[in-house]
């Protein structure tokens, strides 16, 4: 089945001082258009490498990575990315941080000056949808960690990417903020239906947000199971306490425990 | 009542005044030979008598320092961006520069004098040579320490190396750059004066050398004080400049620490 993102039998070794590190081997993964996919696994299993492969930042030594049917042979130019660390630029106001991709991505780049006012309104609206209305003129260092992460999400989404890559975006936040941001991400996704690949080690986060969860093995990482999550949408936070949800989390936890022992 | 904050503000002046007073007292009490260590009052007297040559020579030193420093800023900025740009150039050029920097610049001055003759050129070049290294290193460090995640974000959007440099690398290196200016201007003074002491027709270094060979110790010390004043003023100007231009670096630093 050809999906929006296809990874087929990929192998990747990082060259290091004392020989290479085999990060991925025989990894295959397919994500449909508009699907919310989550990748979970023990730490150091190559989840982040997977992100870099999909976005074309690294190339596999063997196998094939394709996005929208086209083989990825260089940086994608369309993907929005967010990481655990918000990586906002401290010399730019929040709104200008959010607008950064517009200064780089075609065709916005060429229009950036001419249509600055329109883009600014877009950014302000986006900030408002994540609960940062009116904070655009603040500098990132005037915002709390959770607010910075919201702004970072906005930066990943401002150019309306077809693909959003998230690498443990909520890992550094406190539990309450994290759950709040789950809902922010859920709402944004319900509204725009971009394709998401979320790398996380928080199983509840994965089950709450994703359509499909891919469990990775320890290094060299490959996908050992794929689990569809059929919980009805839109999901409320209260779903996290329902037996069906808890069962899925337990099931995944057992799988990861098995994988770690191997 | 004077508050604690006000005390803090007065403190540097009070300490300076106290140490000068102590110096004066020590000289009088122990009858120190003015040829060994002139008292502050004698130095002040030299200032009053020789204010004209001091001022004229200070101006020369200031001018050579600033020209050398100016070249160092331009050269250091360009060099730092190039070195920070590519890992290849970094690994090739950095050891060479470290090696060059470890040469004591005093040793280069005679060569410069042979090449360019006695005058302002060797002083300018020495000021340049001694002050450009910290600028290069700081700018290159600022650029080279760009967060890899941020680079990934931009590259995944199709950013070229030049985009990353303009949007992130160069703005990011600004605090490093302005921080290095404070160090560099002080070093430029050292360079200029060293060169003037070895061979020059004017400048504070030259004045001190002349005064020394005439046994006018108070004038030697007056030259020293003039240098200190110039150095402190230049440092203060660049420190102020730094805090204005890259205020975000100070604020975000404080914010992160809090």
Image: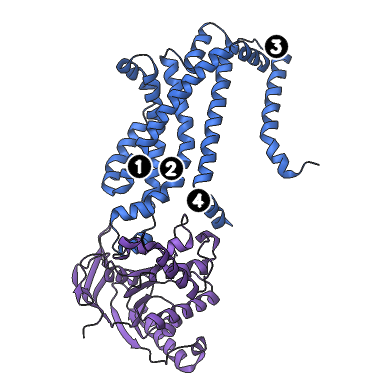
Labelled pair 4, 2 in contact (Cβ < 8 Å): no
Marks 4 and 2, how far apart at CA: 12 Å
Residue A71 located left or right of residue A136: left
Chain B drawing hue: blue
Image point (52%, 31%), residue name: B234
Callout 1 touching callout 2 (CB < 8 Å): yes
B90 displayed left or right of B234: left
Please report contact status of discs 3 and 4: CB closer than 8 Å, yes or no.
no
Q: Quadrant of residue A78?
A: bottom left
Measured in 3D between alpha carbons, the distance from the residue under mark 3 to the one under mark 1, in whole angstroms, is 53 Å
Disc 1 on helix, strand or loop? Answer: helix
Question: Is residue A45 at all visible to an observer of this figure?
Answer: no
| Residue tagged 1 | B80
Are labels 3 and 4 on one chain?
A: yes
User: Which residue is denoted by mark 3 in the rendering?
Assistant: B31
Circle on res. B249? 4
For the point 38% across and 92% down, which residue is it? Answer: A230
Image quarter (top left, top right, bottom left or bottom right) of the C terminus of chain B? bottom right
Residue B208 rendering spot, x and y as whole percentages: 51, 14
Letter of the chain that mark 4 sits on in the rendering? B
Residue at the image point whose x is 47% and y is 21% from the top: B61
Sort mark 2 into few (<14), some (14-19) or many (20+) by Cα contacts within 10 Å: many
Q: Which residue is mark 2?
A: B177
Left/right placement of residue B70 relative to residue B160 reads right
Would you place residue A243 above or below residue A156 in this image? below
Give the mark nearest the N terminus, 3 or 1: 3
Chain of the residue under label 2: B
């Amino acid at each position: 089945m050809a999906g929006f993102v296809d990874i087929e039998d990929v192998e990747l070794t990082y060259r290091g001082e004392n020989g290479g590190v085999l990060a991925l081997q025989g990894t295959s993964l397919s994500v449909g258009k508009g699907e919310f996919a989550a990748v979970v696994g023990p730490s150091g299993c190559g989840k982040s490498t997977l992100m870099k492969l999909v976005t074309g930042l690294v190339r596999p030594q063997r196998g094939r990575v394709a996005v929208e049917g086209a083989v990825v042979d260089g940086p994608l130019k369309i993907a929005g990315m967010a990481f655990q660390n918000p990586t906002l630029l401290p010399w730019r106001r929040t709104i200008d941080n959010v607008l950064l991709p517009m200064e780089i991505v075609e065709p916005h780049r060429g229009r950036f000056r001419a249509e600055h006012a329109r883009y600014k309104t877009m950014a302000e609206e986006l900030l408002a949808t994540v609960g940062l209305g009116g904070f655009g003129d603040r500098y990132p260092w005037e915002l709390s960690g959770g607010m910075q992460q919201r702004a970072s999400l906005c930066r990943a989404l401002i150019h309306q990417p077809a693909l959003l890559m998230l690498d443990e975006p909520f890992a550094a936040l406190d539990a309450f903020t994290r759950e709040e941001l789950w809902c922010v991400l859920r709402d944004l996704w319900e509204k725009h239906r971009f394709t998401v690949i979320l790398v996380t080690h928080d199983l509840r986060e994965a089950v709450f947000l994703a359509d499909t969860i891919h469990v990775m093995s320890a290094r060299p990482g490959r996908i050992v199971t794929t689990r569809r999550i059929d919980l009805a949408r839109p999901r409320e936070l209260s779903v996290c306490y329902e037996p069906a949800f808890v069962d899925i989390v337990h099931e995944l936890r057992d799988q990861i425990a098995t994988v770690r022992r191997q | 009542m004077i508050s604690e904050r006000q005390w803090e503000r007065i403190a540097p002046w009070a300490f300076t005044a106290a140490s000068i007073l102590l110096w004066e007292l020590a000289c009088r009490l122990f009858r120190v030979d003015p040829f060994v260590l002139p008292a502050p009052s004698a130095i002040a007297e030299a200032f009053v008598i020789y204010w004209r040559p001091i001022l004229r020579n200070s101006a020369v030193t200031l001018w050579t320092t600033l020209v050398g420093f100016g070249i160092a800023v331009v050269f250091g900025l360009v060099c730092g961006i190039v070195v920070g740009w590519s890992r290849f150039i970094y690994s090739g050029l950095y050891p060479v520069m470290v090696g060059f920097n470890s040469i004591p610049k005093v040793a280069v001055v005679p060569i410069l004098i042979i090449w360019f003759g006695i005058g302002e050129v060797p002083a300018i070049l020495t000021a340049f040579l001694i002050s450009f290294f910290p600028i290069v290193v700081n700018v290159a460090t600022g650029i080279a320490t760009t967060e890899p995640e941020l680079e990934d974000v931009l590259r995944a959007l199709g950013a070229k190396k030049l985009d990353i440099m303009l949007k992130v690398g160069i703005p990011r290196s600004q605090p490093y750059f302005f921080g290095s200016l404070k160090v560099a201007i002080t070093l430029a003074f050292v360079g200029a004066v060293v060169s003037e002491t070895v061979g020059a027709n004017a400048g504070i270094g030259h004045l001190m050398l002349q005064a020394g060979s005439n046994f006018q110790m108070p004038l030697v010390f007056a030259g020293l004080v003039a240098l200190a004043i110039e150095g402190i003023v230049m440092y203060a100007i660049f420190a102020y400049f730094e805090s204005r231009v890259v205020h975000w670096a100070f604020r975000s630093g404080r914010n992160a620490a809090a």
